[in-house]
Amino acid sequence: MNYKLNLGCWGSVFAVPSDVVDKYIKIAGGSSVKVLLYFLRHSGEPISDEIIANALSMNCEDVNDSLSFWKQVGLLDEVDGSFAPALASSSLPKESISAIVTPVAAVGVTKEQADFAAIKAAALRSPEFTPAQIAGTVKSDEKVDFLFKTCETLYGRPLKHTEQNALITITEHIGLPTEVTLMLVDYCFSINKATPAFLKESAMNWMENGITDLASAERHISMLQSRYSAENSVKSIFDINRALSQKEKDFIDLWYNVWGFSSDMVKLAYDINVNSKGKFSFPYINKILENWHIKGIKTEEQVAEERNTRSSAVESNSSFDADKLDELLLDEYT
């Protein structure tokens, strides 16, 4: 019997370093192998961790964990925040790699955005601490040991390498004191945003704003919690099921934390807006609340009293048509 090769699926192939099978196939998790294969298959194309995550039905954290694994064993390097093959460890010749592989990079961004991202990445970039280095730091520093144990309790499981690395990066590279780092982590958990990337970015922002002691951290967390509570309250009142824009967040901060309105007053302004326009508008509601702020109106009773006063004034003037009463009152808020 004669055989011949069907080149159908073999017409498109890509190279995989021999070390993947020879050295690491036994210790690499299934997710890590899938991420590496997808990464190599799409060499030469712009590709981000989000693209890999969507293609493989994974979350970005697990994708980054997988890429970090291949970096740790020496098959990948991280250059300027992007992953690329580590030439010294690869079984492919240098010319082949440069011809078939490009680093993981962001897609669809302007030059200005890319420049800003590069600056941010440079600020947050840190050495990849090995498990041995991390273990040594934990063993030699009681505060770091307590930080790790507390975080394991918060996560409800042993820390992943990327999480361990993020904590060491924050304390050793960014320079945030351990006790302040613990407050930062606890706050991030309270808002369900305790990813390694968010922790490191928040730590850098705290350092940039001088939040480096317990007192300033307490004040900052109190402010953040106030904003977070106000934003959630408005999302509930307005029935918003999406992320708020920065402009909307600025409106909410103004209403609650500058003008000092309660959720009841915001809801009243919302009701006035919807009853007059059929749908809500942040600028429209802001105008109503601004009007009340200028007049010193802080309660629903004061709103009712003010409207009754205006109603009486209108009714006492025979030149006013009753049908125009509601229209006049509405004009007060627009």
Image (cartoon, helix red, strand yellow):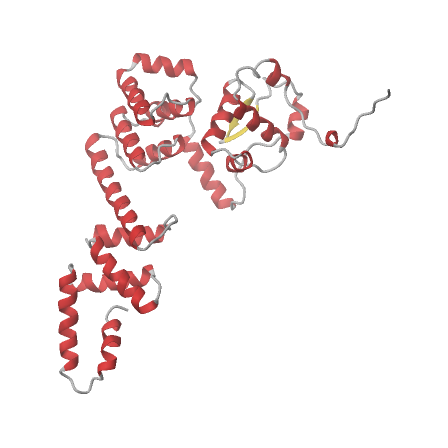
User: In front: 234, or 141?
Assistant: 234
Q: Is residue 141 above or below residue 315?
A: above
Q: Tag count in the figure?
A: 0
* Residue farthest to the right, as pictured: 1
In what quadrant of the picture does the C terminus appear? bottom left
**130 relative to 187 in the view: left or right:** right
Quarter residue 133 falls in: top left
Quarter residue 332 falls in: bottom left
User: In front: 206, or 189?
Assistant: 189
At a point 26% along the width and 15% down the height, the residue shown is 142
At a point 34% along the width and 22% down the height, the residue shown is 172
Q: Could you tell me residue 71's position as x and y percent?
A: 51, 22
Q: Could you tell me residue 100's position as x and y percent?
A: 66, 30
**78 relative to 197 in the view: left or right:** right
Please say whether residue 7 is visible from this viewpoint: yes
* Residue farthest to the front, as pictured: 1
Q: Is residue 295 above or below residue 253?
A: below
At a point 25% along the width and 64% down the height, the residue shown is 288
In what quadrant of the picture does the N terminus appear? top right
* Residue farthest to the bottom, as pictured: 319
Please say whether residue 77 is visible from this viewpoint: no
Q: Is residue 330 above or below residue 106?
A: below
Quarter residue 191 falls in: top left
At a point 29% along the width and 54% down the height, the residue shown is 237
**223 relative to 43 in the view: left or right:** left
Q: Could you tell me residue 61's position as x and y percent?
A: 45, 31
User: In front: 150, or 73?
Assistant: 150
Q: Could you tell me residue 9's position as x and y percent?
A: 73, 31
User: In front: 235, or 250?
Assistant: 235
